[in-house]
Image (cartoon, rainbow, N blue to C red):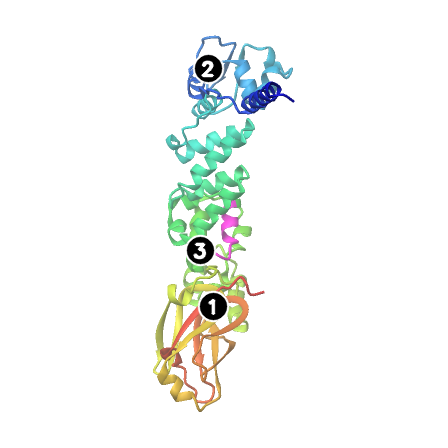
């Protein structure tokens, strides 16, 4: 191959490489959306009108059919409306305008919508098969949960099968139960949503307050059968005094059930406690405080019941270590939910001043103490550092 042919071949290869590079494309999407948005509810080129709450809204079949399967079927699917110039729709007017605005412009001003308006738009988004709108609205509600609106949002989430939003609401109510249960909006909850809330083991509130909130709900929703609701109130967690002075006079709980609730804590320590579930969190530090039951007993009392399965003795002070170096006995770590029934969590060797982990089956706990079986000492918590956690890595 001579030099001229070689140059020609190189030139052809260079052209091919050049032609394979992506060519720049200028996108004018903002202007396109602006132009399309200007047609929303505009009579210019309109070929169909919607009557919503007696308001006439001009529209364009081609745009709506292109943007929505629902409107494609409605306007071009051979239905009665496909031949009509005026179509009546059953929909909230303001919510329908929001949906129209989205279909024309591709934008959704969620920040301008309150919870009630969002719920109505969600209903239309579900009806018109617009999952991206449902997702955006669900995120908006999720980011704006508050004491005053979480009950309404929960009802909305369950109505439209928004699983993630439903769970966010329930967890929010778990953590803020005292305030949510006392708020007036709690009485507006649907029966189904109320039952969903009461089923949760992680609803952090004392059961007498749960009962009183249910009582207020029942009085606000007269005529509703509350047997299934009452069955979810854990009467055995309510003190005898409150059962007699508060629950019984309400008249909504059968006397036999009250008697059963009084008897159950006497014959068993296995009660259906509601409890914090905080994996990896040292609840003895975050939710506990040491206090003396008497001169010889020191107990860690958690502010509420917590699910734990691991207690670590982080350190033993030198004085205690020296005191027991000649004693090979172990101390017993005990846990309780009521300061009456104590369970053996495990043993810790006093002669080993290193971190020791005591593992047991996960359970609700509110009180922790350490007992030395030989000396009878119950004040050993004065001399140790203790962690209590829920360890999800423990089978």
* Residue ranking furthest to the front: 2
Closest to the observer, 392 or 254 = 392
Q: Earlier in the sequence, mark 1 or mark 2?
A: 2
Circle 2: element type: strand
Mark nearer the viewer, 2 or 3: 2
The number of callouts visible is 3
* Residue ranking furthest to the top: 45
For the residue carrying disc 2, how many other residues have a C-alpha within 10 Å: few (<14), some (14-19), or many (20+)? many
The part of the chain drawn in magenta is: 193-202
Q: Position of residue 200 (x, y in %)?
A: 51, 54
Residue 57's disc is 2
Q: How much space separates mark 1 and mark 2, taking CA atoms?
A: 62 Å
Q: Is residue 224 visible?
A: no
Residue 365's disc is 1
Circle 1: element type: strand
Q: Position of residue 25 (x, y in %)?
A: 48, 20
Mark nearer the viewer, 1 or 3: 1
Q: Is residue 232 left or right of residue 369?
A: right
Residue 60's disc is none
Closest to the observer, 169 or 183 = 169
Rendered-image quadrant of the N terminus: top right
For the residue carrying disc 3, how many other residues have a C-alpha within 10 Å: few (<14), some (14-19), or many (20+)? many
What type of secondary structure mainly makes up the magenta span? helix
For mark 3, what is the residue? 210
Where 46 sits versus 228, above or below?
above
Q: Earlier in the sequence, mark 1 or mark 3?
A: 3
């Amino acid at each position: 191959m001579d030099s001229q042919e070689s140059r020609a071949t190189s030139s052809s290869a260079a052209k091919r490489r050049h032609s394979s590079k992506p060519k720049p494309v200028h996108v004018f999407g903002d202007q396109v959306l602006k132009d399309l948005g200007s047609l929303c509810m505009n009579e210019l080129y309109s070929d169909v009108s919607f009557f919503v709450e007696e308001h006439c809204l001009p529209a364009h079949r081609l745009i709506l059919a292109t943007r929505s399967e629902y409107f494609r079927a409605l306007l071009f699917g051979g239905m009665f409306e496909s031949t009509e110039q005026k179509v009546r729709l059953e929909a909230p007017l303001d919510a329908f305008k929001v949906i129209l605005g989205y279909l024309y412009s591709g934008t959704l001003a969620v920040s301008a919508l309150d919870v009630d308006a969002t719920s109505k738009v969600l209903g239309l988004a579900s009806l018109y098969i617009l999952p991206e709108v449902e997702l955006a609205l669900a995120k908006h509600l999720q980011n704006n949960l508050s004491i005053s609106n979480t009950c309404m949002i929960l009802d909305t989430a369950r109505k439209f099968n928004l699983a993630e939003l439903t769970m966010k609401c329930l967890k929010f109510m778990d953590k803020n139960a005292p305030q949510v249960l006392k708020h007036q909006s709690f009485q507006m909850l649907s029966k189904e949503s109320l039952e969903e809330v009461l089923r949760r083991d992680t609803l952090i509130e004392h059961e007498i307050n749960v009962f009183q909130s249910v009582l207020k709900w029942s009085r606000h929703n007269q005529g509703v059968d509350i047997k299934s609701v009452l069955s979810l109130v854990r009467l055995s967690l309510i003190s005898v005094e409150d059962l007699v002075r508060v629950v019984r006079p309400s008249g909504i709980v059968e006397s036999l059930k009250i008697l059963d609730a009084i008897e159950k804590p006497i014959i068993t320590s296995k009660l259906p406690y509601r409890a914090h579930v905080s994996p990896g969190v040292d609840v003895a530090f975050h939710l506990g405080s040491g206090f003396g039951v008497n001169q010889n007993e020191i107990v860690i009392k958690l502010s509420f019941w917590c699910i734990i399965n691991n207690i670590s003795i982080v350190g033993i002070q030198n004085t205690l270590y020296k005191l027991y170096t000649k004693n090979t006995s172990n101390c017993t770590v005990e846990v309780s939910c009521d300061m009456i029934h104590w369970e053996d969590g495990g043993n810790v060797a006093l002669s080993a001043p290193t971190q020791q982990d005591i593992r047991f089956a996960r359970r609700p706990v509110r009180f922790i103490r350490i007992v030395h079986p030989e000396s009878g000492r119950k004040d050993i918590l004065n001399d140790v550092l203790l962690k209590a956690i829920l360890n999800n890595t423990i089978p």
